[in-house]
Image (cartoon, rainbow, N blue to C red):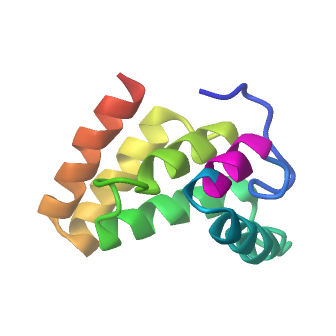
Amino acid sequence: MTDNKAFKNAVLDDQNLQAGLNSINPKFGDFCTRVAGEAWGLPLIDQKTKALITIAIDVVNQDQTGPGNPFGAHVKMAMQQGATREEIEELLLFMCVYAGFNKAAGCFGMLNEILG
């Protein structure tokens, strides 16, 4: 896990995240960094909330399994921005209602793998 220093921009300021994206494919990494970095730079929603929103989207899209899945990166990003495990667990419970219990169950399992 990264240190607990929150970034002003969770994409543009996180060199480890950018390196991970570039390791998938350099052009993909550059594109993601530029586009997502701009979205994460919008001023009205704070970085922690944006990170929690990305986890909610992962639940809906079932993006917690398979190679290159973003769920683990988004959990780490949310925690870097100050979210707690308890907040992420509450978000997953909330998502049961709107995305489905089975979708949230898989994410709880992966969260346990990520955080031990």
**Which of the image's four quarters has the N terminus?**
top right
Residue 7 or residue 17, whichever sits in front: 17
Quarter of the C terminus within the rendering: top left
- Residue 81 located within the stretch drawn in magenta: no
Q: Is residue 48 left or right of residue 15?
A: left
Answer with left or right where residue 35 lies relative to residue 101.
Answer: right
User: Where residue 106 appears, x then y in whole percent?
Assistant: 20, 51
Residue drawn at the location 75% of the way across and 76% of the way down: 39
Q: Is residue 13 above or below residue 30?
A: above
Residue 43: image quadrant is: bottom right
* Segment tinted magenta in the rendering: 15-22
| Number of on-image labels | 0
Along the viewing direction, whichever of 95 and 105 lies nearer the viewer: 105
Q: Is residue 107 above or below residue 80?
A: below
- Determine the main secondary structure of the stretch shown in magenta: helix
Up-down relation of residue 31 to residue 95 (above or below): below
Residue at image point 73% right, 28% down: 4
Pinpoint residue 74: horizontal percent, then vertical percent: 53, 52
Q: Residue furthest top?
A: 116
Q: Residue furthest left?
A: 102
**Percent of width and height locating residue 55:** 46, 59
The picture quadrant where one finds residue 36 is bottom right
Along the line of sight, which residue is nearer the eye, 18 or 73?
18
